[in-house]
Structure formats: structure tokens, C-alpha cells
Amino acid sequence: MRKWLLIGASVLIVLFVALYVVSVVVIVPRLQRGARERTEDYLSKRFESSVEIADFHIQLRPTIRVEVDGILLRHHGRRDVPPLIEIQRALFDANLAGLLGRKADVQLVRLEGLQVHVPPREPGSPPMLRGTDENLASKYPIVIHQIQADSATLVILPRIEDSDKPPNQFEIHQLKLENFAFDRPASFQALLTNPKPRGLINCEGQFGPWLADEPAATPVAGAYTFQHADMSTLKGLKGMMDSTGQFRGPLDYLSVDGQTDIPDFALRTSARPIALHTDYSAIVDGTNGNTILRSVTARFLQTTLSVQGEVVDLNKTVKGRTIELHTTSSSARIEDLLTLAVDRLPPALSGPAKLEARIDIPEQEDTDLIDRMKLTGRFGVGKMEFSDGDTQSKVDSLSRRGRGQPKDTSVTDQPSSLTARFTMDHSTISMSNLMFSVEGANISLDGTYAMDTGALDFKGHLKLDAKLSEATTGAKSFFLKAVDPFFTKNGAGTDLPIKITGTKDHPSFGLDLHDKANRN
């Protein structure tokens, strides 16, 4: 019995070794060739690409494991652009039915060194959602329950006419797809870094089905959170932004709606940080980053601004994007706008304001945003008050003198108004038709204000309802009666040429005698 047991065991060992040798020498190579040919054929048709595979290896123990190295998919076989998909290594467990031609059901696929280069849409092709190739999906059925890819890269290639511009590149720290199949959308989760403003984006939603003929038209929908975005990566701005929103559409025509919060927002010239909240609706072309702002509502302090415009790439030779915005507000406060723009507290003025402005920021990515900003617009402030008591006293005195009642002490805390047209270029604000009015007096000015230095250079006219002699008392009033006719003009009791120089902290007011001499 012992001898027969030894003989039987020996026979089993010989059979096992023989089967192993057959599997290694005959079955596995054939299985590898068939599986490789099937994989290449499928990827070629599914992605409309030529396929290159450096190595394809199958292990049969303990399960069927497939390892594929050096995968390159070139869309339409093009070699003038980077590969559509590049994978250093793919690891997955497969069932025998899938390898032999029936439906493949894969539990987990791990991708190492994944890079996806999305080519641009062909010129003239409108953005649209389309279905997938059902015949191809039924011919090559596959379901992957989970795909994991860490440290992946998504690159959006520029259009042919923008070939001089660098591509938009996103580093994806974590990517997970669930229930992936080519005939229906797959669920995804992704964690990636946005370059500017720099911060982490966490998004999840539905991706696909993949459109092989137009990858940029592949539909996607989901929600995102954008956390701790550092606004200082945009020179001229400060603050940390958090944002949430939803997106939907093809990659090159995404409809995005969301909101942002920056509790410590500030311009380089701001007096202090403020809390800024925005609600927005936009269209984003994911292939080039161009953004159309359909509507933006910005709220800070007691002010609300309505904004429309676009952030687009117009200059093909300069890195960055051109920002063109149109801003309006009928519910602003002048003290809020000054807090945002000027480094002085408390703001010199307060009162309800109306604003209309066009904002243009040309493309020069590495320069200060404030220095690049160009503004054109107009504003008006009604029932204006001055925070400085001495200044308000001077305004009250101006009103008394303008009425011809210089000693009427009951005239105090007089409200005033201010309107102007303005432009800003290279941090210098130029104002025209600046009109300051208080009962009994009007001041009209033209000039400039330098945001960085605070320098003032204004010239204009002071007009009083009263004659010059009526604006003062005592001996001065008597002697000024002789010159009243020289300063009466255009129906005003007094018309004096004036100038304002110095700085915003130390202004200097005086008569512009040079202007008077020229007029004489």
C-alpha cells in the first residue's frame, strides 16, 4: 500500500508539473496573445486611436492577473500632439470569460502614471451632447467596478490657432471611477490642485459616456468644493477663498453655478480686509479655460454689485487671460468702496452710491493686477457725510458762505452730493466732471489721484450762489464789493478758479491764479 501511495503521489506530481509546463509554455502565451490582440483592437476602436503596448503579461495564480506596461493611445494616430492617453502601468484581475471573448467583469483596476491629453474640438464644430456607439459597446462589453488612479495628470490642449499658448494642466492627486462602462456614465471622485488661485478642488459626479470622435464633447455633471484657494497667487489680491458649486455639460461648454466666500479679501491698496461673498453663473470652455460670466452678484459690507463679462485668452503671445467686466450697482455705499480701494480708515466719506464701470485687465500674468487694471465709468453719491469733523465743519462753512449767511450757526451737518466720470490706468485715477454740491455752493473739478502715493492734482471752479462780498463779513466784505463783478459768471454769484494739490492725507486748497490770468 505504501508503495502504491508513493507511485500515485509521484504520478500526481508529474501530472501537475506537466500541466504547469503546458500552461506556461502553451496556454499562457496563447492567452496573452489573444488577450493582447483583443485589448489593442478594443482600445483602438473605442478611442479611435492607434495603440502601442510595451509589455502585456498574464499570471494564472492565484487568480488571473493582467499587467500591462507602457500604454500609449494616439488619437487618430496623430504624432504632432501628445498621446490622448498614456499609462505607465495598468494592473487588474480578470475573469476567464472576459479574456476568452464574453462579457468582462473586472472588480478593480489600478492605473499608475496616468496622463490624459484632451485634444481641442475641431473648428466650427458646435458644442453638443451626443450618444455613444451602442454597436461598439455591445460588441466589446466590459464593466469595471472601480478604477483607481493616483498622481494622474489632465492636460487640456490648446486649439490650433492658440498653439503658442501653454496647455491647461491639472494635477489630480486622487481619481476614482465606479461602475465604469463605455455605454453609460460612470461615477467619479477626484481631488486636484487648481494652479491660480492655488487651492484644492474636490469634485464628484457623473462622467461619460466617452465620445471617441470628439473627446472634448464628452458629457460630465457633478458638484465641487474649492477649499483654501490662496488669492495672493494672483498678484495684487489677498485672502483665502472657499467655493462650492455644480457643473454640467460637455467638457468644452460647461455650465457652472456656485458661490464663493473670502472672509479676508483685500486689494493691495485696501484699508483692511473685508468679507466678500459672490453668487455666480458661468459658461466654461474646459479646452482653453475661457469663461463667460453670465451673472455675478458680489456682496461686501453694505454694498451689492452686479457683474457680467468674460475671462478669455485674447493675446496669443502673452501668458495669462484678459478680464473684461461690466459692473453696476444701485445699492452701494461709498464708504464700502473706499474701504476696498483706499488704505485709510475710517473712510473719508459715507453715503449711498450708484456705480457703473467697465473693468479691463489685460494679459500679463506675472505683473500686479492693480497695475494692469483699467477702469472706465461713473459714480454718484447722495446725502454724503464726512467722517472727519473738521472737514464737515468746512463743508458747513462753505454752505453758509455760499448762501450769503456766513454767521448763521444753525447751518450745520449739511448733506452734500458728489458725481464724477473716471478712468483708471496704471494705478492712477483720472476724473472729469467731478461735481461736489452742497446747498449754496458747487465745486467742479478735473484731475488725477495716484492710488499708491495718494497724490492729488485737481483744478476747477468754485461757484457760490452769493456774491464774494456776501460770503464774508466785516471789512473784508466791504472791500470785496469792488471785485464782485470780476468773479460773477454764468449766473453764479461767485465763480472762483481753484486747485487741490498735496496728498489725500494732507490736501492743499487754493486759488488757481494761473487759470484766472489766462482767462483775463
Image (cartoon, rainbow, N blue to C red):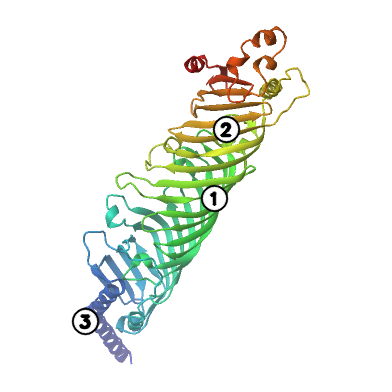
Identify the residue position indicated by label 1 in the image.
242
Disc nearest the viewer among 2 and 1: 2
Pick the residue in front: 146 or 134.
134
Residue 213, image quadrant: bottom left
Q: Is residue 473 above or below residue 152?
A: above
Residue 503 drawn at (x, y percent): 53, 22
Q: Amino acid at mark 2?
A: Ala
Q: Is residue 14 above or below residue 114?
A: below
Q: Is residue 261 above or below residue 4?
A: above
Q: Residue furthest right?
A: 410
First-in-chain label (3 vs 2):
3
Q: Quick one: SS at disc 1?
A: strand
Residue 282 drawn at (x, y percent): 48, 57
Disc nearest the viewer among 3 and 2: 2
Q: Amino acid at mark 1?
A: Asp
Mark number displayed over residue 26:
3
Can you say which quadrant of the picture contains the N terminus? bottom left
Is residue 57 visible to the viewer in this orientation of the structure?
Answer: yes
* Numbered-mark total: 3
First-in-chain label (1 vs 3):
3
Q: Amino acid at mark 3?
A: Val
